[in-house]
Image (spheres, grey):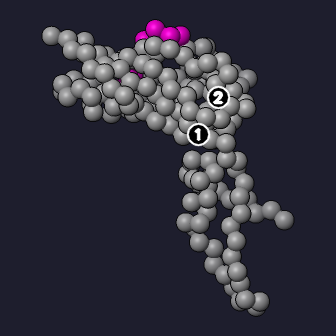
Amino acid sequence: NRENFTGNGGPVYNIPKGGAQTFDDEDFNDYYEQIIHSGWSLSHIRFDGLPASSQGTLWYNYRSTGNPGTRVEAGASYYHGTRNPRLDRVTFVPESEFTGTVRIPFTGWDVDGNYFSGNVEINVRAGGGTGDIRYTCVPGRSRDFVLSDFTRLCDDLTGRSLDYIIFED
């Protein structure tokens, strides 16, 4: 008793220009659970199409630009959990000057053979990694910095959490 479910959604990732995004198989499993309420779990997905070369490349076992791993193939199965090839080892690497939204269509199956479709959406932001936070201070007095100002600026510029700050002259 296999059923087909079509969805318009799927995992969404936001990365800065020049960044990379490794997929989290739990994001696909969460989407599967929203679409199919079968009590089963996600088995695997297949990418029905790949990004245009002007947008970027999907890699399997990506480590760095010097060690990118192997190209992901459309129609190949990538598995949820620990079975190889693992979905959580697929990484999207945008072309160096690309900014915009990439949608990668996929079809997924559960362990009972039910299948569903969706799109992985990757938003590559143009924002850089520098910005200004301005405070005023009366001469001779101190001014505390507000952590939320820094975390908000970091999120606005990069879409990521703040790790550290470097103060420059």
At 67% from the left and 47% from the top, the residue drawn is 127
Question: What is the x, y in percent for residue 31?
Answer: 33, 31
Over which residues does the magenta segment extend? 73-82
Q: Give neighbour class at mark 2: few <14, some 14-19, many 20+ (Cα, 10 Å).
A: many
Decide whether the magenta segment is chiefly helix, strand or loop.
loop
The C terminus appears in which quarter of the rendering?
A: bottom right
Work out whether 32 lies above or below 153: above
Question: What is the x, y in percent for residue 5?
Answer: 27, 20
What is the number of the mark on residue 94?
A: 2
At 57% from the left and 47% from the top, the residue drawn is 159
Callouts 1 and 2 close, C-beta under 8 Å: yes
At 54% from the left and 40% from the top, the residue drawn is 14
Q: Mark 1 to mark 2: distance in Å?
A: 9 Å
- Pointer 1 or 2: first along the chain: 1
Work out whether 140 lies above or below 143: below
| Residue 71 falls inside the magenta stretch | no
Question: What is the x, y in percent for residue 29?
Answer: 34, 29
Amino acid carrying label 2: it is Pro
Label 1 SS: strand
What is the number of the mark on residue 103?
A: none
Residue 110 seen? no
Q: Quadrant of residue 145?
A: bottom right
Residue for badge 1: 15
Question: What is the x, y in percent for residue 149?
Answer: 59, 66
Q: Give neighbour class at mark 1: few <14, some 14-19, many 20+ (Cα, 10 Å).
A: many
Amino acid carrying label 1: it is Ile
Residue extending furthest toward the right: 169
Q: Quadrant of residue 131?
A: bottom right
Residue 58 seen? yes
Label 2 SS: strand
140 lies left or right of 150 = right
Viewer-nearest residue: 37 or 167: 37
